[in-house]
Image (spheres, grey):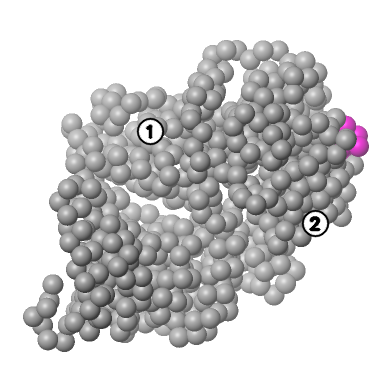
Amino acid sequence: MDSGMGRHEAEPGYGRRGPSAVRLIWVYPDLLSTYGDRGNLLVLDRRAQLRGLGVEIAEVNSDQQVPVDGDIYLLGGGEDLPQILAARRLASGGGLAAAVSRGAVVFAVCAGYQIVGTEFGGAEGEPVPGLGLLDIASGRGDRRGVGEITADVDPELGVERLTGFENHQGVTRRGPGAKPLARVITGIGNGDGTEGAYSGRVLGTYLHGPALVRNPGLADLLLSWVTGPLPQVDPQQDQLVRQLRTERLAARPIPA
Amino acid sequence: MSTSSPPSRRTSLPLRARLATTVGGAAGRASRLAGRGDGSVIGGVIGLRLQPDLLSLLARGRQVILVTGTNGKTTTTRLVTAALSPLGQQVASNAFGANMEAGLVSALARAPDATLAVLEVDEKYMPAILTTTSARVVVLLNLSRDQMDRAAEIWMLARRWRAALAAAPDCRVIANADDPLVAWAAGQARQVTWVAAGQRWHDDSWCCPQCGSHLRRDGEDWYCGECSNRRPPVSWVLAGDEVIDPGGKSRSLDLALPGRANRANAVVALAVAEVFGVSAGQAMGAVSQVRSVAGRYTQVERHGCVLRLLLAKNPAGWLEALDILVPPPVPVLLAVNAQIPDGRDTSWLWDVDYRRLRGRPVFVAGERKTDLAVRLEADEVAFRLVASVDEAIEMAHSPSMEVIANYTAFQHIRTVLGRIG
């Protein structure tokens, strides 16, 4: 990120937050950024700025401490080995868990979704301990789910239908402490007809990469958990995204 | 076909293999005549159906050079072929990018008497093809994210390369030392020529492939802070517009092809030529004259506007393509599809930094133009949506235009423009 778009990079570990700025922390882009994960950061940034909110962004690599004073933490996708390394370092650093205990928002995608659970499947399918921030456990399924996914979000969250792309071999079971994020219409998701999970302000999904791009309502939900209710976005600023949603929701699911 | 020349390699093939290449060749010609592509896949498919070990039979007795990597395979294959031309020998090559087994079979079957073969090979198939062809040389250009909905993940791919090359002691590897994943993949090979070919895209090599720690970078150098993995000592160097050979001699790289990536590909081609006794001085002439490769970099005039066609299939490729754009105010047309050869998933758009396109006319086309439009909006790049190349030309009113497209969008534009180049 450069500073050319009205934001600046905050030093990890230093709270330089202005009075109304939303602080976004991208966790370990060196390990967990497989396919367009930066998109979630850019969408949150844009939608906050459309409401006149200031944004501070910190990209925290795996050799740095995860700051505890962020507002929204983003975890992206990754291959097996980077995923295991990321889980190990996040567990030993403790910053993310501390942030969650003080009420920070976590949005975790794909490999990141599995990491925030209690365990996930390693390179050979062996169980690897996760961070235990969300009451889910993941393992390796029989086949890879690759393709477009659509799902209807838990009505309690008030978010419109999800559209995204999934590319994973994970199967995720929820414990009593987590609710499903959505019910699958087309695609695989968790493998039991549900997609993603959430508990408090920790939310994860198998919609990979830039999941928030096609789902601005989900981006707004995460922001509102930080700021309280948000004003509507000027419809003109939303026109292209609405068009994209219409196209993707109308697209016939293609088995890849 | 050279059935009249007595020492033909073709007649040394078993009868069934000869039949397989004849039938396959006929099918390829029929496919070309029917206008269904260049016919280099269908012929190979039929040949392989008749003779499953046809590739191994066709490769026997030849010196095979395999070229692989995420980006630059087709161009480098072309440049290596040019670099070897001073030998005056016939060279078999899949010059049009058909880089899986069937395409390789067709390339070899079309040139039965060629004792040299320069073959581009898909990253995923390289280990199998290396074994099948007993390749003399393997070129590893780079490794970065590309169409992950159908390709293997790249750390996994690097492991497979590493194992395959460790098991091929007679093969010489020409590898890019500046790409940590490539360097690691070649790290257990017996014979390696390390080339400092540069790495523009770093986002897939922040971490050590050996131990996973965050890699340190210091100028061109890279090393792991935790384990012994580091950039190997290089013998060929791309330094700006010059190449430095293993003897320390600098030479200007005056290429007809544009961009840093192609200068890197040319240095790799010179390193390959050296293995076959062709000096950089001898190889340079032919290398510098390659102008366009399977339609890439071709300039085409259309309704008074000269279009230059650039192919970019993944984030690293887009970065290289954006690097070589001529400066504003020359307009740019971007076209993106998401068919199977492109990858069905457009997430990669968010890995490309488009902010460099601010302040010049930008047109957006292709089947997934809305995805691209949303991406450009987030980067605050002004653009106009168009339905076709012609609409962009009409709206641009410019004597020239740069075109960057991904795979099937590129082929579609080439078809519209009449498959020139």
* Disc assigned to residue A128: 2
Please state, as top left, top right, bottom left or bottom right, where the N terminus of chain A lies in the image. top right
Q: Measured along the vertical axis of the image, is residue A37 above or below residue B53?
A: above
Q: Secondary structure at mark 2?
A: strand
Tell me residue A90's x, y (percent). 81, 51
Front residue of B306/B96: it is: B96
| Magenta part of the chain | A99-104
* Disc assigned to residue B366: 1
Q: Measured along the vertical axis of the image, is residue B373 above or below residue B295?
A: above
Q: Quadrant of residue A88?
A: bottom right
Q: Quick check: B127 left or right of B58?
A: right
Q: Quick check: B82 left or right of A46?
A: left
- Distance of label 1 from label 2 (alpha carbons): 42 Å
Tell me residue A126's x, y (percent). 76, 60
- For disc 1, the chain is B
Mark 1 or 2: in front is 2
